[in-house]
């Protein structure tokens, strides 16, 4: 797993390695963070790293956000586009590995407090082959 942060930009990013590069539906990465400043809006992203052998142009995920009381404050299913037959992969690549950071429609305003995000892959293929890592990124606009 890796975590990144930058100077004055309020940024949270965390990615987890997918065991054996086979994302089983029961493997649901969780990401915890604390929002201190609720005065500005935030943008949410889904991050994914996969091999060129990944068989689809998209991935269906379910993203759930829970507050510190374990109440669901947000839950949504996304069809995340990763490429097309005409243009190839949309992310950046090196050799046979591709990284994507995809903007998600999500609440922009968050109350101060601790949050936990849960990401589930909900594709028909289970396990989902050739996925190396997945994560979330939340940054101030």
Image: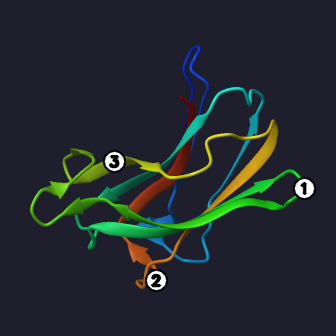
Towards the viewer: 7 or 112: 112
The residue at which mark 2 appears reads as 126
* 40 relative position to 136: left or right: right
The residue under the point 55% across, 48% down is 136
In 3D space, how far apart are the residues under numbered discs 3 and 2 (Cα atoms)? 21 Å
Residue 8 percent location from the top left of the image: 59, 14
Which disc number belongs to residue 99? 3
Towards the viewer: 124 or 81: 81
The residue at which mark 1 appears reads as 69
* 109 relative position to 97: left or right: right
When asked about the image quadrant of residue 66, the answer is bottom right
Q: Determine whether 102 is above or below 124 in the image.
A: above
In 3D space, how far apart are the residues under numbered discs 1 and 3 (Cα atoms)? 33 Å
When asked about the image quadrant of residue 34, the answer is top right
The residue under the point 61% across, 33% down is 41
Q: Determine whether 140 is above or below 33 in the image.
A: above
Residue 29 percent location from the top left of the image: 62, 60
């Amino acid at each position: 797993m890796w975590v990144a942060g930058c100077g004055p930009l309020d940024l949270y990013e965390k990615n987890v390695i997918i065991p054996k590069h086979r994302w089983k539906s029961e493997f649901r990465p969780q990401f915890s963070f604390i929002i201190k400043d609720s005065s500005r809006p935030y943008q949410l992203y889904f991050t994914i790293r996969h091999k060129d052998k990944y068989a689809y142009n998209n991935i269906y995920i379910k993203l759930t956000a829970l507050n510190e009381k374990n109440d669901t404050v947000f839950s949504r299913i996304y069809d995340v586009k990763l490429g097309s037959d005409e243009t190839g992969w949309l992310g950046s690549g090196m050799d046979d590995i591709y990284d994507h950071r995809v903007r998600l429609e999500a609440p922009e305003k968050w109350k101060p407090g601790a949050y936990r995000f849960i990401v589930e892959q909900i594709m028909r293929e289970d396990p989902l082959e050739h996925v190396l890592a997945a994560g979330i990124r939340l940054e101030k606009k």
